[in-house]
Amino acid sequence: MPIQDWKDAAHAAGWDAQGDKTNPTRQEQLDILLSVMADAYQPGKWTLDLGFGSGLVEKMIFDRIPQANVVGVDSSREMMALAAERLTPYVERYQAVEHDLAQIESLILPEHPYQFAISIQALHHLTPDEMQTAYRFIYSVLEPGGLFLLVDRMRVETPGLWSAVQSVWARQDRVYESMIKDREGANFAEHEQIVRGRGDLPMGPEQHLSWMRDAGFEAAILHLHGNRALIAGRKLS
């Protein structure tokens, strides 16, 4: 499978149309994320979305939290164009910033009180050093008590459990009519080659927790299904 080119308009539009077919747990994890945000939301505060893509999540946020305000950051103008069209009704509650997350230290954000930072299937493209830099940046941006919510692909780290992982994917394909198992490789070595070929650099959940805690967060896994996780980090001070 070739590297995903988010700057290609056709690829961006194709993912926007059927991205859930390769990640059927996405909707459940997003619903959990939105439930956490809605229950804790403070009027007047903002959400930072790193890698907001085509604005699908922003639309869900605005539908769930009518007074929410969001700053979205992305490096793909093609995806941002899709977001601009989708979010036209919410133009006063939404700001877009074009920036490469691999260079997050130079990101200049609008000055707002950020209660939440979220990232949905975007940070697994970063190297380990870039990921740790991103976590430190997110911690610095959030208000005390602020919450970071990560939904992302996790690395399959257990070759001895490969057949069990495949069974999870096969069940997802059966239950959700998705297209996962055949796309992820016939064996562990082929799977790792496919992941690298996509340009993905996923890390295991324990590594994410360790790096979040190193950045200062109190961190925990809220939901884990196969190789997809929702992880939360709270800025305590």
Image (tube, grey):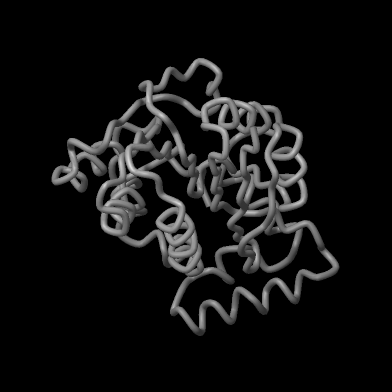
Asked if 49 appears above or below 159 in the picture, the reply is above
Q: Nearer the viewer, residue 205 or 76?
A: 205
Q: Nearer the viewer, residue 37 or 3?
A: 37
Q: Position of residue 148 (x, y in %)?
A: 55, 43
Q: Position of residue 82 (x, y in %)?
A: 24, 43
- Most distant residue in the left direction: 89
Q: How many marks?
A: 0
Asked if 161 appears above or below 136 in the picture, the reply is below
Task: Please tell me in which quadrant of the rendered image residue 137 appears.
Answer: top right
Which residue does the image show at 55% across and 64% down from the upper left?
A: 183
Q: Position of residue 83 (x, y in %)?
A: 26, 43
Which residue does the image show at 52% across and 32% down from the upper left?
A: 142
The C terminus appears in which quarter of the rendering? top right
Q: Report the side of 10 relative to 224 (left or right).
A: left
Which residue does the image show at 48% across and 58% down from the upper left?
A: 36
Q: Position of residue 63 (x, y in %)?
A: 26, 57
Which residue does the image show at 74% across and 39% down from the upper left?
A: 213
